[in-house]
Amino acid sequence: MCGLSGEVRFDGSRPDLAAVERMTDRLAARGPDGRGLWSQGAVALGHRRLKIIDLSERGAQPMTDPGAGLTVVFNGCIYNHRELRKQLEGAGHRFFSHSDTEVLLKAYQEWGADCVTRFAGMFAFALVEHESGRVVLGRDRLGIKPLYLAEGPGRLRFASSLPALLAGGGIDTSIDRVALHHYLSFHSVVPAPRTVLAGVGKLAPATVRVIEPDGTHHDHQYWNPPHTRLPQYAGMDAADWCDAVLDGLRTAVRRRTVADVPVGVLLSGGLDSSLVVALLAESGARDLATFSVGFETEGGEQGDEFVYSDLIADRYATDHHRIMVPSDRLPAALDQAIDAMSEPMVSHDAVAFHLLSQEVSKEVKVVQSGQGADEIFAGYDWYPPLAGVPRAETADAYCRVFVDRPHSALAAMLHPEYRIDHDASEEFVRAHTSAAGADTALDAALRLDSRVMLVDDPVKRVDNMTMAWGLEARVPFLDHELVELAAACPPELKLAQGGKGVLKDAGRKLLPTEIVDRPKGYFPVPAIRHMAGPVLDRVREALAAPEARARGLFRDEYLAELLSAPDEHRTTLGSNALWQAALLEIWLQTHEIG
């Protein structure tokens, strides 16, 4: 797990090494264990390293294979790197390290850009062919690892975070109005290739981009699992599916123990993270480090779920760490978490993850997390209303239960210069859900959420918040083979028992009923959800700041309405509308934009 950066020139000039150094230094938190730079011809690469696999300097990056004429910078982990290494050695390749980075290099030499289809893992990389000058960018199937892009005159820059690109300079930081529409309508999700800044994009998940020396490029999407009933699973009943899901998760959890350092677990006490702990214990893990976070009660809302995490920790005798955060820590933590965000992320548990990661990083370098189960096994409350909806009506039904507000409402919120005259978010949903490869309305919704919402909300949140403290988070529910299995699972089995039915059946084989049948939880931060105390003070300060007044994103009447009743205005899914507006403005100010 690391941070990467780079620049490619297309105009015959040399890359700006000073800019690449600034970008690399901005990624220091992602990789506190090492720093490296490389430049040849029109390309310069930078890297910050977090030592997880092959702790020696032989695993340092940028990594060059002189014989193959290749150099790479890589962020992530290829969990099956040992199996691939044996295969590559059988094909005649010789290795100088034990790192998965070198396996990537040899795999590219052997199989070209198609090597990504052989990787089980999370990754983003930039690889240079010395002889041709070609640059290859790649991102994992579920977009677990980020890769941001910024085009400029005669050049392309890339980095593991948006703030790193800003550190390089020369970025168009004007607001992308379509992205702003997504932010305010599509539940704060801005799908690739856009970001809220006009001058910064991002490589889509499951994509390889091949860039020629003249600047032309082509993208290849190498993975798009069908959300249909597949022949190989014909005849399976509910018990068969339960067994298949449990076996698939067992494999996913085992894969994510590959490391040369200890691996812990972020334990919320919910079904998903509890299953991860149970399967690790089943595999023989002892004295497993587990971590839970809690906050003070606000607005009558309980701020911790320790009763559940304690139950699992006691059952499996883990080395459990309770982290209780007093409310007076929130203002400083809020700004630190927003500084760590590559893009504005409204979900208030980003702050919880940030504070949790700070403490966890003092104990371990790697953790497994239960993130992603709801999106692939239908755990959210907006999925049941889609059952029985005619396939042709998917987009309308989905927008009713998920979209924060209709397009027409944005006119009352935004100043005219930030509006667009079409419903970009609904158009995006309609195009995605109407594509072939999904049998039912629920299948289409789950495909959309697993390919888009998951990537640019919960997955991005976990990556940004953990990597801000040099902590690697692994997500077994997003093992691509498990995701493929879940996509083929009959919708009624996923919707059963109020959602995640097939996963709950698997949980009953290992977990107490109090965990399996408990109400759905999350990392609650009541002070943000209810705009209480110092959080509300920070919001008022940000919205009244000179930068906010000069930018003029939101109409004064709209902000006054929100501030008059901070806890009353909510979106379709219950998010605090004041926090959504304020978070965007705080993010822009924190990153010194406009």
Image (tube, grey):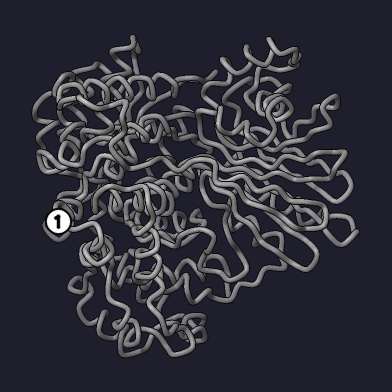
* Whole-percent x, y for residue 44 in the image: 80, 47
Q: Is residue 384 left or right of residue 205?
A: left
* Whole-percent x, y for residue 383 in the image: 20, 52
Report the front residue among 65 and 511.
65
Q: Is residue 584 above or below residue 117?
A: below
Q: Is residue 238 above or below residue 156?
A: above
**Residue under numbered circle 1:** 385
Q: Is residue 8 above or below residue 318?
A: below
Looking at the rendering, in which quadrant would you find the N terminus?
top right
> Residue 49 appears in which quarter of the rendering?
top right
* Label 1: which secondary element: helix
Q: Is residue 109 left or right of residue 120?
A: right
Report the front residue among 299 and 103.
103
* Whole-percent x, y for residue 390 in the image: 19, 58
> Residue 60 appears in which quarter of the rendering?
top right
Report the front residue among 577 and 548.
577
Residue at image position (70%, 44%) is: 136
Q: Amino acid at mark 1?
A: Pro
Using a 10 Å C-alpha cutoff, classify the residue at mark 1 as few (fewer than 14 neighbours), some (14 to 19) or many (20 or more): some
| Residue 538 visible from this viewpoint | no
Residue at image position (11%, 37%) is: 518
